[in-house]
Image: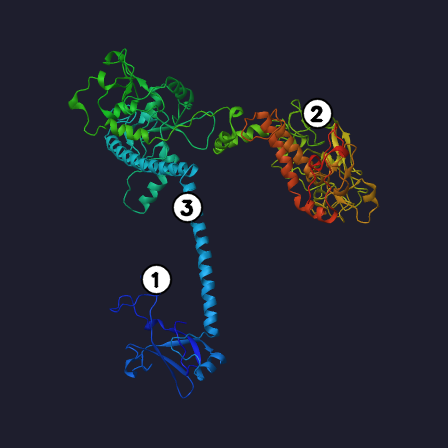
Amino acid sequence: SSIKSIHPDVKERMIVNLSDECRPSRSSSNDVQCFTNPSVDSRAQTVHIQLLRHPDNTVELKTFSGSRDPNTDSIDPSSVDTSATWNVLRSFPLSDAVNTRGSNGEGSNANEIYYDDFLDEVTKKQEQLKKLEYSIEKSARHLMSEAYKERIKYEKGEKITAKQHETKILQDYHAELQRQREASMAWQAQLEQDMDAVCDVCYDGEVTPDNQIIFCDSCNVAVHQKCYGIDRVPSGNYFCHPCSYFEKDREYLAAERRDGPRTAPSPLPIVCELCPKRQGAFLQVDMKIPTRKSHWVHTVCAKWHGMNYVDIELKDRVEDLTLLKDYFKSLSVKCYLCQSGIGALHKCRQENCDKYLHLTCARSVGTCSVQHGEGLEGIFDITSLEHQPWTLACPEHSDVDPESIPENSISTDQLVSIAKSYPPEPLPPKPFYKMTGKERKVYWSDDDNLAQFFEKVMTNTTGAKCAICDGRVDQHDKPCNECGVLVHTSCAYAFESQFSSGTCSACRYTKASIGTEDYEEPKCHLCNQHGGFLVKSSAKPVSMKVWKKGSRRWNKSLFGGTKYCHAICAMWNEQSYIEHFENEPIAQCKEVIMSNGMSHITHQFRCVLCGMSNGIKADCSHPECRKSKEPWKYHISCARAAGFEINDDMKTCCFRHVDSSSVFRARLEDFLEVELCRLPDQTIRASAPISWDHASELFHAAVTVLRTLGWAWRWAEWWVKWGDNWEPLIEDHQNEADMTDEELKKVPS
């Protein structure tokens, strides 16, 4: 398109492309620049080419490195670069008008320009390209502006806070690594100190034939037999209590069998409840409230604070330390040496000195006077002691000879590092009824707290429902002590003997008969639901001619053995009833069991809910269903769980005829109503505090919703087939005709 005139012999124009290997590189000595780099000064170059048409009518284009003679428009053949490879992309024949004008000599002036169709098209494309570049520039500027705004937004407000928080986490991480390194060095120093052949409990290195010093083969702690409760010296290996508890003994013996080198003892995953020292002779703490993690204390720490053994013979556990630790927390005192308030401390024996110290810190530093109360021979005679037994003094009030300070004593800086590596003790939890939503999440993140919470709300009967009538129970209704099933006192009137001893009939039978040959776990033979309120069931065959009591066939049938069924399955079925035999309620099921004793009279029908054919199925009480050729049949227990209507007059209704107070939506509404009634302004605020009774009510309502939600797949099928049967839940003071769609909670779908 850069050619300014058209030679008369030119028949066509071509778009050509020079191959990559023929393009001059930027490192060449000539002045040619790269076309595609927008940062260079020159973006165009003039290339002279020669077009050759061969006898076989093929076209060849060649570049030349010499100059063209403007007078002759010819190219010196010797200057043609034959190594160049040109690719013809497209050819355009010139229009006849241009060729005619060229042949007639009209407009043959070299300075006159003739544009053919190709040049017009290229010109149009050039204009379009300019417009496109202009529009792209506006879009690019807009995108850059948006990116700039997003960057400004990122660097302000919450993002800055988050970035600062991440930076602080990294700083804390590096600081924690440094503390761990320092604590590890201090631990090694304490380990070397403990390698001395002195008892870790009484700090005495003397021995007698009946009171030897014994070393743990795993952690190397040294103890007297009597100080640590070892009756006799073991003939083989010996392992202390924590090493045996954490199976370090197995690791040691396995390495010994492999004849491998002994590895250096690693710190046990425990800490003393009363001091920051990591190693030593430990005893397990008998916690009043069981926890997932075991708790340990140094034997010497427990003795110095007067704690008792749980078993005076075994001497392997000490009593709970919670009260002792709480007392020192209330004092808000810290150890003078390690600068921490961990566990329990001892006050300096000097009058008017208000310094407190850990016993193990005082012994490790070497500059404190420590007076033990017992040694190799047992309890010391007070008259022979320089100071009162079981007392210590701070460095300022100690008379320790500098030459007697052990070389491997630990510095106060190392004690501080050890104390910093001690896991922080959890703060006493806030009362549950005062917690906010976020505080409850933190509280529940601990497995022990979560287990305690569920234990409390599950044993709380507020919001629980009767297993027979499905109505709310009150505080006078008590659950079974064994299985926890709960029924109204009035509903259980017909089964008054069921809770005579605080347990239901099924639990009493299990307790009395489990392990016997004829024992069969109590479960309802009329449905497939587990649990619930079970009563004894009885059925007799029409004729005993084909039956023999006690036979294997008899015991396997529904006539023999001890059978149970749900109270609701028996009461809401037209063919079964409750009768009393020897003052005990019995569900009489002889009318619903086939003569073969292996199935029920409705075995040919499947439950429309669970799909199973076993058990007895009830019919929908609505006349339309009773007249239908395919009546709805279902287990009573399945119907209650799925949200079908179970009336107090012993009638049931299926999905198409159920009352709106029983459907899934009604149970969701009841669930929300519990939360709405929690606050005076009738709003749902998850962050507001919650009482234990309200938590229990929410829990039981949620269980009901989840139980119904288990049948959502069946409800979805029926919604598609018959439409939505969610009738509005109208209160007594409301009139449906006067209510809006929003008040009626109608869903457009």
Q: Nearer the viewer, residue 674 or 343?
A: 674
Task: Identify residue for label 1.
Answer: 37
Q: Is residue 714 left or right of residue 25?
A: right
Q: Residue furthest left?
A: 403
Q: Nearer the viewer, residue 734 or 583?
A: 734
- Whether residue 637 is situated above or below residue 408 in the rendered picture: below
Q: Residue at x 57, y 25 (%)?
A: 692
On residue 489, which mark appears? 2
Residue 80 in picture, x, y percent from top left = 30, 80
- Secondary structure of the residue carrying numbered label 1: loop
**Mark 2 or 3, nearer chain start:** 3
The answer to which image quadrant residue 494 occupies is top right
> Is residue 250 visible in this depiction of the protein?
yes
Crowd tier of the residue under label 2, counting other residues whose Cα lies within 10 Å: few below 14, some 14–19, many 20 or above? some
Q: Residue at x 76, y 30 (%)?
A: 581
> Is residue 237 visible in this depiction of the protein?
no
Amino acid of disc 3: Tyr
Between marks 2 and 3, how big is the CA–CA gap?
Answer: 72 Å
On residue 148, which mark appears? 3
- Secondary structure of the residue carrying numbered label 3: helix
Between marks 3 and 1, how big is the CA–CA gap?
Answer: 26 Å
Residue 436 in picture, x, y percent from top left = 51, 28
Q: Residue at x 35, y 71 (%)?
A: 20
Amino acid of disc 1: Asn
Residue 66 in picture, x, y percent from top left = 28, 77
The answer to which image quadrant residue 520 occupies is top right
